[in-house]
Image (spheres, rainbow, N blue to C red):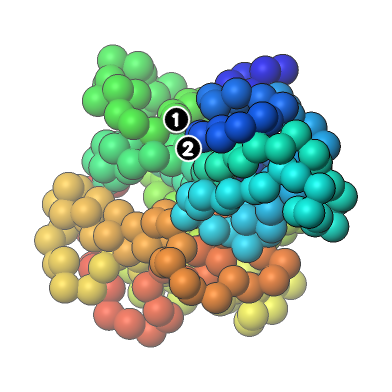
Amino acid sequence: MDWLTAAAQLRQDGEPGVLVTVIEVRGHAPREAGAKMVVSRDRSWGSIGGGNLEATATARARQLIGSGSCEPEVREMQLNPHARTEHGRQCCGGVVRLLLEPLAVRPVVALFGIGHVGYELARILSRLPIQLLLVDSRAEQLDRVRLADVIDGSADVSIHHTLLGEQVLEQLPRGAHVVIMTHDHAEDFALCDAALRVGRPLGGIGLIGSAVKWTRFQAQLAELGHGPEAIARITCPIGRPGITGKDPASIAVAVAADLLPALSPRAKGAPAQPGLTSEERAGREGWASKGAPAVSVKAERAK
């Protein structure tokens, strides 16, 4: 693959990368300004000239990936016998400036239930640079004419009509955020159970519903063997405090506002948590705190 195809493939696969571009050359250098390469955790595509120059750029790119940095940076390298790095010397005689641009992974949001509230939430989220999965057991809710406003947004939207949403859950990437708001409480419960059994760490897991519904679900999840720590991974009710409307649009705005911090790039200078992807870190910080007052979603008819 060339660098452009590689960048597109990384985005599709949900893998981070760094685009490295030669932005200036003074004197002799192995490649001209404009040469590019893409670096992932374990591969690279394209070339900026090989040798010490490329090895140093690749190593730095992987440091950026490991730190979760979203900030581009410029690095200047001297290519002469006196400029030695851990990768050796390159004696072309020139000076090269490189631009390293992190290719951030688009956060993944899986929305289960595209009824009245789900549709309004999908409309809002589709305006963000994310991967948005729309899942429903009812084919009419996923009609492309109905979802035209969603499909035309900035998000990468995929539509999944399935009687068993658990099958979609099993395929979600690490750090994906799950929002459960189907038309059927039994379906909601099955999805909660499946989300806690997924063999990879998810981001936030949010469930629409009242405090009464959540109390019942907690007891049922415990009966199935889920411990308190696992059950606490699910947030219910969901919604930003202070947004109290019960109409579908108001509920959707409240839920989107609650989820938005998890979909934003990590704040500049914030310490990274070793072993977690940026999506996983965001998922732990994005949903409303347990016990905080949240928007009422007792009007289940709104779904």
Residue 281's place in the image compared with 80, above or below, is below
Q: Earlier in the sequence, mark 1 or mark 2?
A: 2
The N terminus: image quadrant: top right
Disc 2: CA contacts within 10 A as few (<14), some (14-19) or many (>=20): many
Q: Is residue 119 left or right of residue 172?
A: left
Q: What is the number of the mark on residue 156?
A: 1
Which quarter of the figure has residue 257? Answer: bottom left
User: x, y percentage for residue 220?
Assistant: 60, 69
Q: Nearer the viewer, residue 274 or 194?
A: 274
Quote the CA–CA distance across marks 1 and 2: 5 Å
How many marks the image carries: the answer is 2
Per the image, label 1 sits on a secondary structure element best described as strand
Residue 10's place in the image compared with 184, above or below, is above
Q: Is residue 263 left or right of residue 150?
A: right
Which quarter of the figure has residue 17? Answer: top right
Q: What is the number of the mark on residue 131?
A: 2
User: x, y percentage for residue 206?
Assistant: 45, 60
User: x, y percentage for residue 15?
Assistant: 65, 41
Q: Is residue 75 left or right of residue 45?
A: left
Q: Is residue 91 visible?
A: yes
Disc 1: CA contacts within 10 A as few (<14), some (14-19) or many (>=20): some
Identity of the residue drawn at 57% across and 51% down: 75
Q: Nearer the viewer, residue 32 or 107?
A: 32
Identity of the residue drawn at 69% across and 58% down: 63
Identity of the residue drawn at 16% across and 54% down: 250
Whether residues under marks 1 and 2 lie with C-beta atoms below 8 angstroms apart, the answer is yes
Per the image, label 2 sits on a secondary structure element best described as strand
Residue type (three-letter) at the residue carrying disc 2 = Gln
Residue 187's place in the image compared with 143, above or below, is below
User: x, y percentage for residue 86?
Assistant: 85, 57
Identity of the residue drawn at 35% across and 17% down: 144
Q: Is residue 191 visible?
A: no
